[in-house]
C-alpha cells in the first residue's frame, strides 16, 4: 500500500556533521548527496517550508560530544541557524527525546522530507518513527548516504533501504521529483 504524500512537508536534514561527512570513512557519493540536500534547502526556502537540521550528540568525551568540532554541521551545508531549526538528538530516531513532533505540528506540517546520514541507522529509524506517528514521509533516494561496512557496500545499503522503506513507511522520490508547496 503506498504511503501518502505530505501536503505541507518540512525538510528534515539528519546528521550532516563534520565528524561523519569529513571523517576517516568517506560517505558514499558524498558530494552528490550534499549538492542534492542543498538543492532541497533552496527549494524549501522558496516555498517557505520549515527546515529542521539535527545533530547526533554523543556523550561527554566522545568525538561528537556537544560543542566539539566533529559535532558541528558540515560548513558546506546551506543550513542557516538564524532561520532554520537546529536541534540535537541522542538516539537514532529524530523524534525520541526531542520536540520535533510538536514543532512539526506547530508549523502545520503533515510530513517530512528526509535526507542526510546514515542510511541504515538514523535515516531508517526516523522514517519508520515518523510513519508510526502518522506523518507522511518522503525519503529522498539520492540525498541520503552512509559508509561501506565489512558486510555491504554503501550503495547496496542505500538501495536496500530505498526499496525496504518504500510503500509502508515512505514515498521514495529523487531530488528532482520532490516538490515543496508554497505556504
Image (spheres, rainbow, N blue to C red):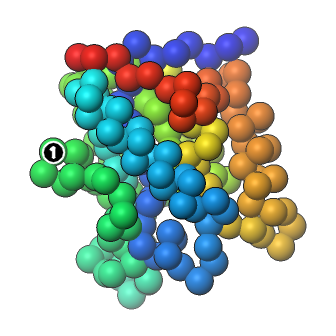
**Which of 3/29 is in front?**
29
Q: Is residue 127 left or right of residue 78?
A: right
* Residue 173 in view of the camera: yes
Q: Is residue 51 left or right of residue 124?
A: left
**Which of 132/16 is in front?**
16
Question: 62 above or below 168?
Answer: below
Quarter that holds the N terminus: top right
* Residue 118 in view of the camera: no
Label 1 belongs to which residue? Answer: 83
Occupied quadrant, residue 151: bottom right
**Which of 101/16 is in front?**
16
Q: Image point 63% across, 78% down: which residue? A: 25
Q: Label 1: how many residues lie within 10 Å, few (<14), some (14-19) or many (20+)?
A: few
**Which of 112/128 is in front?**
112
Q: Residue 29 placed where, x, y %? A: 64, 59
Q: Image point 77% across, 34% down: which residue? A: 163
The single residue placed furthest to the left in the displayed view is 82
Q: Image point 84% across, 62% down: which residue? A: 152
Occupied quadrant, residue 26: bottom right
The count of marks equals 1
The single residue placed furthest to the bottom in the displayed view is 61
SS assignment at label 1: loop
Quarter that holds the C terminus: top left
Question: 25 above or below 154?
Answer: below
The single residue placed furthest to the right in the displayed view is 151
Q: Image point 49% across, 46% down: which residue? A: 36
Question: 179 above or below 15?
Answer: above
Q: Residue 40 placed where, x, y %? A: 41, 38
Q: Residue 93 placed where, x, y %? A: 49, 48
Amino acid at each position: 500500500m503506498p504511503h501518502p504524500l505530505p501536503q505541507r512537508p518540512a525538510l528534515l536534514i539528519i546528521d550532516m556533521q563534520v565528524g561523519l561527512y569529513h571523517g576517516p570513512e568517506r560517505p558514499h557519493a558524498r558530494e552528490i548527496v550534499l549538492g542534492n540536500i542543498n538543492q532541497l534547502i533552496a527549494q524549501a526556502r522558496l516555498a517557505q517550508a520549515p527546515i529542521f537540521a539535527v545533530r547526533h550528540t554523543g556523550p561527554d568525551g566522545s568525538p561528537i560530544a556537544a560543542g566539539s568540532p566533529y559535532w558541528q554541521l558540515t560548513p558546506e551545508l546551506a543550513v542557516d541557524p538564524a532561520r532554520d531549526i537546529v536541534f540535537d538528538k541522542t538516539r537514532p530516531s529524530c523524534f525520541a527525546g526531542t520536540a520535533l513532533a510538536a514543532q512539526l505540528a506547530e508549523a502545520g506540517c503533515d510530513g517530512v522530507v528526509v535526507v542526510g546520514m546514515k542510511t541504515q541507522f538514523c535515516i531508517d529509524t526516523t522514517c519508520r518513527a515518523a510513519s508510526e506517528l502518522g506523518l507522511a514521509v518522503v525519503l529522498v533516494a539520492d540525498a541520503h548516504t552512509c559508509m561501506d561496512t565489512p558486510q555491504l557496500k554503501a550503495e547496496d545499503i542505500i538501495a536496500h533501504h530505498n526499496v525496504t522503506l518504500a510503500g509502508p513507511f515512505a514515498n521514495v522520490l529523487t531530488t528532482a521529483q520532490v516538490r515543496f508547496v508554497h505556504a
